[in-house]
Image: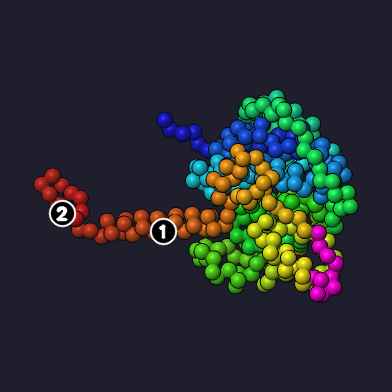
Amino acid sequence: MTPSPKTISVLLLASLPSLSTPHFLAPVIVSAANAASGRLRIVLFSRLFDPDAISHTRNWDNVQRLLTYIYVQATKTAQDMDNPLLQVDVLLKGMSMQETLPEDIGEGCEVVYRVSGDVIAAALPPSLLELSHRYISATSDEGRTSPEASDDADILPMLPVVALGGTFDHLHAGHKILLSMAAWIASQKVIVGVTNATLLGSKSNAHVLESLETRKANVRTFLELFKPGLEYDIVTIDDVYGPTGWDPNIQGLVVSRETINGAEMIADYREKKQLPKLTVFIIDVISHTSSNITEEDLSLLRQTKMSSTHIRNWIAEREKQQQEAQTQRTEDRSKPVERGEFGWISPVV
């Protein structure tokens, strides 16, 4: 049976009743990811995403858990299809008039995936109505209660300036969770430090590392898509500190559980420089040892490779296979052929 052709870019639209992990969306995400070959853009709507609807900082854990679940479902599906280069973007949009989708959100898409019976009470660009819509039944989500927010009443609902850093090579789901959460808690500006290529020589398959300019451009493009209206300062860093080593206007720092040592170094350095202490926000649900997600979700996470190393290894292996195939074709063409009784025959081997 010949498989149906895949669309290059797919859009998925769905509404969320709460910030609970949306297990009910799993079959819809898998169907959309199976249909996409180049990009899958997922837009989640909720009144909880409206401006000032909830405290963004106190709901840090809830939102990072939600985003991680969506990204893991889509990324695992793409990897199972040997397509680790599938670009997955997850956007959070409110229902108010202030939260309009850009008119070109569906540019390049051939199909929009929806949840059967789902009514999105938000204005959608007219251009989306011209696209083919496919409705997928969701699984039951009965019995799930809305998660509680953090009880830290002393922290501001959002912080004016938030910083984070990383390599951001071949921007993948893990990177996008970090960037999304930094933008989620920022009200004015996000500073992103992107590691200089001179520090990355020890990386595996360094020859397929993206250029510094490409990595910085990809970070900016994603952030401006995820949360337009903020100021984004994308800078080159040559050490662990970057702007956090001198900028007194930064209030928050976003790190992963694996890079918590860097946050401690920054805290010590700022204390020595008599700079204000930073509030540290940790992305820990993308850790394979996290205690913040269910055993079922943790099992799926362990099977999902969200790393630049995995992507570079995949690209390098593909390049090796292509070179070997090209070498074999060249050798085959160079072999002498003999003319037999019934015409030309295969090369002599």
* Magenta residues (range): 270-279
Q: Is residue 310 left or right of residue 62?
A: left
Q: From the viewer's perspective, is 280 left or right of 134?
A: right
Residue 5 percent location from the top left of the image: 50, 36
Question: Which residue is pictured at 20% across the width and 54% down the height?
Answer: 347
For disc 2, the marked residue is 338
Residue 26's place in the image compared with 304, above or below, is above
Q: Secondary structure at mark 2?
A: strand
Q: Residue 76: percent from the left, percent from the top?
A: 56, 43
Identify which amino acid the numbered label 1 is placed on: Lys
Q: Is residue 284 above or below residue 210?
A: above
The answer to whether residue 307 is above or below residue 234 is: above
Corner quadrant of residue 191: bottom right
Left or right: residue 344 versus residue 171 is left
Q: Which label's residue is closer to the chain start, 1 or 2?
A: 1
| Image location (x, y in percent) of residue 171 | 62, 55
- What is the image's colouring? rainbow
Residue 94 in sight in this render = no
Q: CA distance from mark 1 to mark 2?
A: 32 Å
| Residue 277 on the magenta segment | yes
Relative side of 25 to 124, left or right:
left
The numbered disc on residue 320 is 1
Q: Which residue extends farthest left?
A: 341
- Is the N terminus in the top left, top right, bottom left or bottom right quadrant? top left
Residue shown at the point (76%, 55%) measured from the top left: 281
Image location of residue 111, percent across then percent down: 62, 35
In the rendered structure, does residue 247 fall within the stretch colored magenta?
A: no
Q: Residues within 10 Å of mark 1 (few under 14, many from 20)?
A: few
What residue sits 66% from the left and 37% below the top?
12
